[in-house]
Image (spheres, rainbow, N blue to C red):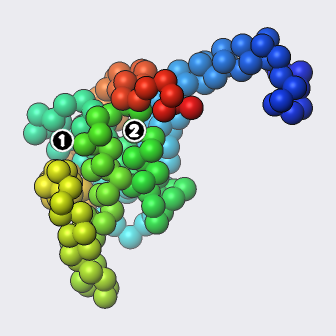
Amino acid sequence: METVAFIRMEDGTAEDYALLDRLGEEHMQTLPDRLLAALEGLRHSFAGYQVTRYEHSLQSATHAYNDGRDEEYIVAALLHDIGDELAPITHGEFMGAVLRPYCRPEIVWIVKHHGVFQSYYYAHHSGGDRNARDRFKDSPWFDACAEFCAKYDQNCFDPSFESLPVEFFEPMVRRVFAEPRYLTGDELI
């Protein structure tokens, strides 16, 4: 295995950093594989629903596809909950950060905030504020996020719904995550 010679970054050479750049690029090429593996991990995630979180994600993406949404939107619908495993309280923010270089700002905003918007459907049953989303009412993407939750999230727990298989969506994931398109070079650091 190739490694750098330094143990402190300040001691690295141009050759060390050229190696890390090459290895980093190779690693970036496998991002779609890691995202699809994280999606697969939702098969064994949080229990209690009539479908797995994996199936929920497939239903979300299938509904978005059936409605003619574009690939960025469909992929965001597919992956919107994969942060649940590592950041259950802030999973939307987690996934928004992952999507940020690859999807337009509106989609990133929707995914980042979908958790609070989704609570509209259940918070009042457990003492929460179902209208917590109203603090974002001045956002230009408020309606888009409310629509995402209505059409592609809260209604995607149906065990009788026939989702498209993950293999159908895989090429879309690979295209969307082929290269960052929404950040400048300075922002990628």
Q: Position of residue 104 (x, y in %)?
A: 29, 35
Q: Mark 2 and 1 residues: CB-CB less than 8 Å, in contact? A: no
Q: Check disc 2 and give the amino acid type.
A: Arg
In this view, the mark in front (2 or 1) = 2
Residue 106 lies, with reference to residue 177, above or below; the image says: below
Secondary-structure class at tag 2: loop
Instruction: Using the image, determine if residue 177 lies above or below residue 86.
Output: above
Which of 181/88 is in front? 181
At a point 25% along the width and 60% down the height, the residue shown is 157
Characterize the local packing of mark 2: few (<14), some (14-19) or many (20 or more) Cα atoms within 10 angstroms. many
The answer to whether one can see residue 58 in this image is no
Q: Gap in Å between the C-alphas at discs 2 and 1?
A: 19 Å
Q: Where in the figure is residue 40, as x and y percent of width and height?
A: 46, 43
Element under label 1? Answer: helix
**Residue 47, above or below 100:** below
* Residue named by callout 2: 100
Residue 127, given in percent of the width and then of the height, sits at 31, 88
Query: Residue 64 bears which disc, if any?
Result: 1
Does residue 178 appear left or right of residue 7 in this picture? Answer: left
Residue 71: x and y in percent read: 24, 30
Tell me if I can see residue 105 in this picture.
yes
Question: Residue at horizontal 17%, vertical 44%?
Answer: 63
